[in-house]
Image (cartoon, rainbow, N blue to C red):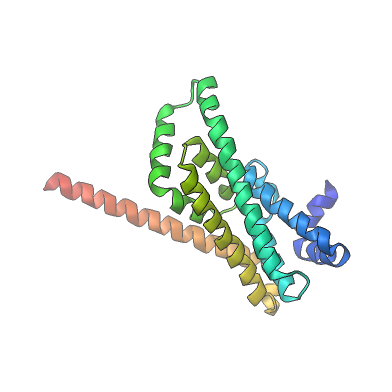
Amino acid sequence: MGELADFFFHIDDSLRQATLLYPVATYGLLFAVIYTETAFFPLAPFFPGDGLLFAIGVLCAAALLNPWIIFGLLTIAATLGAWTGYRLGHRLGPVLFERFTWLNRKHYFRAHAFYRKFGATALFTSRFLPIVKALVPFIAGVSEMDAARFARYNFLSAALWVGSLVALGYFLGNVPFVRDHPSLLVIGLAAVFVTGLAVSAIVKLVRTYRQRRAGRTG
């Protein structure tokens, strides 16, 4: 357990050593990490998905990993992981509401309506948010989001997530500050993304409030 924690806390050095010692097995390890992080949200906090993808991009730039194999393999891993979370939510959702009668069914119907209208947006935005990326597919399954629609946007969002972060590491990995502080860049990007979502939500709330107020006075 200590060795695993050390691997994740020193992801750049650990991954570089792994690619040098076990070049083929490293691909399998990366697949397993991305799949697990996106499939099981209780385990998501223990896996460095965004930072890992950026570090992978840096190693691709150093020719230690093949970027095209990485892109295809990890896109499949992220797609299958989210699909697993979706199926778990779809199967466990009805059981949860039948077994735990204290659960408010109003929330279930609201979630169902939300994913019918904004499911694609939720999938794309959640990919770049730690922990949330694994929780959203599960909730989508609980709310019975259309399976074909989920599968389509699941694959596209996985490709965008993997491709953008690996490409970022690939093109910025040789910049001295970025190379020495990769985690700061990932945290900064996440902060910018979350801030953008918060501002967008506030603008929508203000706009909705004004429309309702105008309707009442009109």
Q: Exactly how many numbered labels are in the figure? A: 0
Q: Nearer the viewer, residue 215 or 33?
A: 33
Is residue 137 shown above or below 129?
Answer: above
Left or right: residue 138 versus residue 172 is left
Q: Nearer the viewer, residue 135 or 29?
A: 29
The image position of residue 125, as x and y in percent, is 49, 55
Left or right: residue 84 versus residue 136 is right
For image coordinates 39% across by 58% down, the residue present is 200
The image position of residue 166, as x and y in percent, is 64, 67
For image coordinates 34% across by 57% down, the residue present is 203
Whether residue 181 is visible, yes or no, is: no
For image coordinates 80% across by 60% down, the residue present is 26
Q: Residue furthest bottom?
A: 175
Is residue 155 shown above or below 110?
Answer: below
Q: Residue furthest front?
A: 148
The image position of residue 192, as x and y in percent, is 51, 63
Whether residue 137 is visible, yes or no, is: yes
Q: Residue furthest left?
A: 218
Is residue 91 shown above or below 140?
Answer: above
Is residue 194 shown above or below 215?
Answer: below
Residue 71 in which image quadrant? bottom right
The image position of residue 178, as x and y in percent, is 67, 73
Left or right: residue 185 versus residue 94 is right
